[in-house]
Each structure stands twice: as structure tokens, then as C-alpha cells.
Image (cartoon, grey):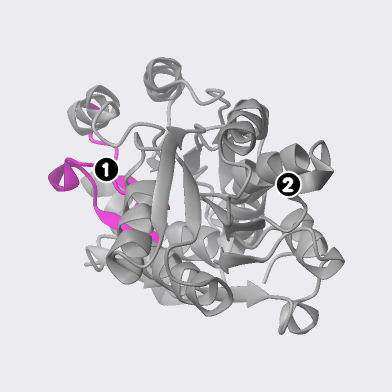
Amino acid sequence: MKKLAMFLIVIAMVGSVSFAEKGKQIVIGYAPTTMNNPFWLAVLDGVKSVLEPQGVVIKTIDPQNDQSKMNDMIGDLLVSGIDALLVAPMDSAGVKPALLACKEKGVPVINFDTPVKDKNLVKSIVASDNYNAGVVVAKDMMARLSKGAKVAILHSPSGQACIDRYNGFIATSGRYFNLVQVLDGKGDTGVSLPLAEDILTANPDLGAFFAVNDPSAIGCVQAIAAHPESKKVLVYGVDGNPDAKKMIQAGTMAGTGAQSPQTIGKKSAETALQVLAGKQVKANIVIPTFIVNSGNVSKYGTTGWQ
């Protein structure tokens, strides 16, 4: 690892010379919760924009929202040989065995999007201001609904990012809303859809859904489409993915606490290279979040991420 660090310091000094040109093949693992979510693909685009011009090989895995599977797959990456790992866990605490395995192998870890519980086992955490994403959603919802309106939340409490979004929403809204249900939608459209339908059936006067990510919010939108009597129910998510923004433009979704996955990917990749070069990096790198709603969606567009 010391030899690798010294080599990368030389690379950093020459700047424009790629790793591949210097004859050293660098391999970095990319471990999101799933590859079946456009957010993680957009993060990967950001990673590629930094690493591919340098000739760095990127090895990706798809644990399909299963932390145990992710841990096993990270073990496989370590066996295959990687110089650093970028990871966004499904379970912030459950990823610890994989982090310990990386430590044992001397492989530095950059934690992106979803902060791990054991922060001492990662070099840096690159994440959106997830608490603020919940704050901006709560403020927008409060401006549109009267005090006492019924609200349901589709949570995903195994991930710290989602916990932070939930906490930001709850702290900001306080007792303004009548919170009728908090269910685990697992950040998945297919899981959230039937849960949202049950909530609509039990609460015909529901005012809004807050989903902790856009895939869950899309499940809520689909549930409302099957219940036209509930078409006035507002739906908010977090991410700002293109499909959600199209729904905002069409009027079927109220808003999303937007983040920039490509920026997260770029910063994560840049930080990994800095660590491999032996440089000191920030323990926390925060990416801003903001509300996207019908008033500004045209500014950010619907064909890509902001």
C-alpha cells in the first residue's frame, strides 16, 4: 500500500498523465444498494467521468437491496483485487463485516450517499444534505396543506440517509400534520405501491404522502392513479430523478427534495484517488439539497439529473 501511495503521489504531481500511461492498473469497486434504481446509475456516471479518463478500472456489483449479499459481494471484490471501495450500504450498521474485511485487506473505503454507522472504518463520507431534503419537503408541504391534514410516510429505516430525511421532515413539520401511518416501503416502487393503496383505503381524506426516495414516491403516484377519488392527494419524494420530475411537470407529483447523484459520484471518485495518493481528505463532504416543484421544475429539466 505504501508503494501504491508513493506511485499515486507522483501521478498527482504530473497531473495530466493517466494511471494507465504510467503502467499501473488501478481498480476501484463500486457497491450501491442496487443497480435497479436510476439514482445509482447516475452516481456511477459521475464516478466514470472521473476514473475512466485516468484508465482506472471500475468493478460494480448489484446486491439487489440485500445487505448480506452486498457483504458477500464486497468479499468477492476483495478477493479479485481492488485498490479502493466506494460503497452505499442498504443497512448502515449491517455493512460492518464488509468494512472490517476491507480494513484487514488494507483497502480504503469511501462511503457515499448513505452514511455507515461505524464511521471510523471509512476514509470519507460523501453524501447529500439528507436532513435538509426532509426539511425542504416539509416546508413545501406545509405551504400547501392546512394544519391537521393527514399525512402518511413511506420510510426505509435501515439506511441512515433515509433516517435523516425522515428526521428533517418530522423536526420541521412538528405537530402541524396528523401523521396517520409510517410504513417501510424499502425505497422500492413495487413494495411501496400496495402499501400506499392500503393507506388510501384506510384514509380516504389523506392529504399527502412523503416518501423518503423517488422510487417509493412513484409507487404512491401509481396507487393514486388506481384510486381516482384520491387524485388530490399530494406526493413528495427525495432524489429529483428524471421520472419524478416528469410527474411533477404533469401534476401527478407535488415535489421532491432534489440531490445531484452525478456530483456525489464525482466527489467520491476524486476522494478515492486522493486517498490512494496518500493525501488527507475531509471526513464529511456534503452535497446541497433543494426542493423541486411545479414552480421550478422547468429550470432543472426532466431529461436528466440536476
10 Å crowding of disc 1: few (<14), some (14-19), many (20+): many
**Residue position marked by numbered label 1 in the rendering:** 116
- Name the residue: 34% across, 34% down: 158
Counting from the top left corner in percent of width and height, residue 151 is at 49, 53
56 over 72 or under it: above or below? below
Three-letter amino acid code of the residue under disc 1:
Val
Residue 140 appears in the picture as rendered: yes
Marks 1 and 2 in Cβ contact (< 8 Å): no
Residue under pointer 2: 221
* Side (left or right) of 218 relative to 176: right
Q: How many marks?
A: 2
Q: Is residue 111 left or right of residue 99?
A: right
Q: Quadrant of residue 8?
A: bottom left
The image quarter containing residue 268 is: bottom left
* Range of magenta residues: 105-127
Disc 2 element? helix
Which residue is depicted at the point 27% across and 26% down?
A: 94
- Say few, some or many: other residues with alpha carbon within 10 Å of mark 2 (under 14 / 14 to 19 / 20 or more): many
- The residue located at (53%, 55%) in the rendering is 19
Image quadrant for the N terminus?
A: top left
> Is 285 or 23 nearer to us in this picture?
285
